[in-house]
Image (cartoon, rainbow, N blue to C red):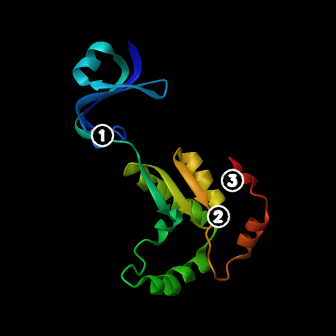
Amino acid sequence: MIVDTLIHARWIIPVEPESVTYEHHTLVIDSGKIIDLLPTDLAKQKYQGTTTENLENHALLPGLINCHTHAAMTLMRGIADDVPLMNWLQNHIWPLEQKWMSEAFVKDGTDLAIAEMILGGTTCFNDMYFFPEITAGQAIHHGIRAKVGLIVIDFPSHMHLIRYLMSPCKKSER
């Protein structure tokens, strides 16, 4: 049977069944769906892939999910990262956010974060930060799943946040 993709892997570690590792198995994908998982020897007899990946020294596992991100903050990585949390927030991060926060900042930081997440195997992330509609748009643009929400913070911020919060949330209905 001709299928879209065969992925021959040294190890396949599925979500279900739990605590199982399949050695020398093949994942069979057709029309965007996994249709079979079987020993590689059998897969080579049963299927012919339009595309075949041989991962002889790799483990194939489901995408990772990052449940707590502020993706755009990748642009502030390394800033005073050796001080206690409240010192870091109050004396370093919040002043920088008040000075530099913009849609462009969130877009650029989110693009960098998404590239790093995809490179590391993350396929879904949960984000809460300024301009969530920008983060959601970049996730859609890059084809990564995301759950995006508003931040809750108690300090004076830019007026454009007030404008955003008072506008209908139609953009988030995608």
The quadrant where residue 62 appears: top left
Rate crowding at label 2 as few (under 14), some (14 to 19) or many (20 or more) other CA atoms within 10 Å.
many
Q: Which mark is residue 172?
A: 3
| Circle 1/circle 2 CB separation < 8 Å | no
Q: Which residue is mark 1?
A: 13
Label 3 sits on a secondary structure element that is helix
Q: Position of residue 6 (x, y in %)?
A: 34, 25
**Against 74, is 58 above or below?**
above
Instruction: Give, as a three-letter code, the residue at label 3.
Output: Ser
Q: Which mark is residue 131?
A: 2
| Circle 2/circle 3 CB separation < 8 Å | no
How far apart are labels 3 and 1 at the CA level? 34 Å
Residue shown at the point (53%, 44%) measured from the top left: 143
Q: Is residue 53 visible?
A: no
Q: Is residue 174 visible?
A: yes
Label 2 sits on a secondary structure element that is loop
Which comes before the other along the chain, label 2 or label 3?
2
| Circle 3/circle 1 CB separation < 8 Å | no
Which comes before the other along the chain, label 1 or label 2?
1
